[in-house]
Amino acid sequence: MSDLNDTRRGVFGEFTKGFWKENPILVMILGMCPTLAVTTSAINGLTMGFAVVFVLTCSSLIISIVRNIIPKQVRIPAFIVIIATFVTMVDLFLKAFLLDLSKALGPFIPLIVVNCIILGRAEAFASKNSVGLSVLDAVGVSLGFTVTLIILGGIREILGMGTFFGMPVLGARFERWVIMLLPPGAFITLGFLLGAKNLIDRRMEEKRK
Amino acid sequence: MEVFLIFISAVLVNNFVLSYFLGICPFIGVSGKIESASSMGFAVTFVLTLSAAITWLINRYILIAFNVPFLEYVSFIIVIAALVQFVEMFIRRMSKTLYDALGIYLPLITTNCAILGLALFGALRQYSFIENIVFGIGAGLGFTLALVVMAGIREELDLADVPKPLQGAAITLIIAGLLALAFMGFAGLISA
């Protein structure tokens, strides 16, 4: 599998790895705080995901452009300032145009600054690779993050409210599992989601043999 | 009385880890052994208390005084990063034993979202200076409590027969869910 990857990885691989093989949430266990906190509904997950797509793509772009100018010793503070600037932009944008969503996500939009996914990609990828590859890597990883957030938010919204993106799916007679919307539901759903991914990986591994 | 309520609320009712989901990364990463969990907990409590004081001063005398609220995130994160660096140097000079005990956990605190989260919550809720510091201490102790309880459970878990796909982070998250459920029992303690 690994030699196949080396040849095919290239441009396409940098983009797709974020969805499954290096999924930031399910494999790297990064960015847990927003993952758990905002996924009470699919739309919240989607908004958070897009905010991260924007911040990660822009900051990766800038960091990979200036990567040769920044001295090694101060690179982390420099990265954080770049990231914080884009987070401020997203936050002001949401406050101006999508006030309800901005209120629902609360302090978790500013907390993108310390989201380890973003600093992790900056340090591990954008500071070492060309501009094009860095942007691809950023878009791929953050879309993988978004998809996972939507799945998690979707499961919690369907079981907790009986709706998906606000549309009723389970009918009026469905007894809501309120616990799914509360903190315990977040931890437990994500735990089982991780378990499901491990199970699928093991099945695929066995099939290959 | 008000101050006492803020303290209890931050430790138990609105526990930073189990109900605000702040500081989940160290919660999952460092909760393997009780000893390292409590070292991490106290390091975070220390930084939380200091940063609660300093971010309050910055918010009041720079951000509000000069009317530049859009610099909130940038200035808070710079202060926190500088503070962690400073605390690290200070502890290394003052107590070698403490420094060795905390080890790698000290620099990692910069990206612990509990620190920035506390600064943001404090600014949002417009606490007074004393209230903000008490809030910081409470949040830190709550974080330590969650971490140590979790580490205690995980040390026992080594003996349990966990299904293969759930081993590692998955079972840790499910246990955290059950802990969060237990902590919800404190909700009646304070009637908001």
Image: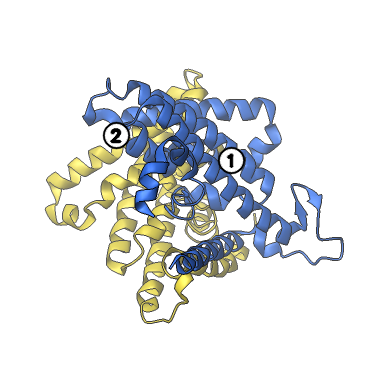
Q: How crowded is mark 1: few (under 14 residues within 10 Å), some or many (20 or more)?
A: many
Judging from the image, mark 1 belongs to the subunit labelled A
Q: Residues within 10 Å of mark 2 (few under 14, many from 20)?
A: some
Where is residue B182 shown, x and y percent of the image?
Answer: 55, 70
Q: Residue furthest top?
A: B66
Say if B70 sits above or below A121 in the image.
above
Residue at 50 percent of width and 61 percent of height: B12
Look at the image and give the colour of chain A.
Answer: blue
Q: Residue furthest right?
A: A172
Say if B38 sits above or below A100 in the image.
below
Quarter of the view holding residue B40: bottom left
Q: Which of marks 1 and 2 is in front?
A: 1
The numbered mark at residue B82 is 2
Say if B182 sits above or below A150 in the image.
below
Quarter of the view holding residue B150: bottom left
Quarter of the view holding residue B130: top left
Q: What residue type is labelled 1?
A: Met
Judging from the image, mark 2 belongs to the subunit labelled B
Where is residue A24 shown, x and y percent of the image?
Answer: 46, 48
Question: Is residue B127 shown to the viewer in this render?
Answer: no
Q: Do labels 1 and 2 share a chain?
A: no
Residue at 28 percent of width and 52 percent of height: B105
Question: Is residue B34 shown to the viewer in this render?
Answer: yes
Cα separation, mark 1 vs mark 2, equals: 28 Å
In this view of the protein, which residue sits in the foreground, A126 or A160? A126
In this view of the protein, which residue sits in the foreground, B34 or A195? A195
Q: SS of the residue at dot 2?
A: helix
Q: Is residue A102 left or right of residue A191?
A: right
Which residue is the site of mark 1? A48
Q: Which amino acid does label 2 sit on?
A: Ala
Where is residue B67 shown, x and y percent of the image?
Answer: 51, 19
Q: Which chain comes out yellow in the rendered image?
A: B
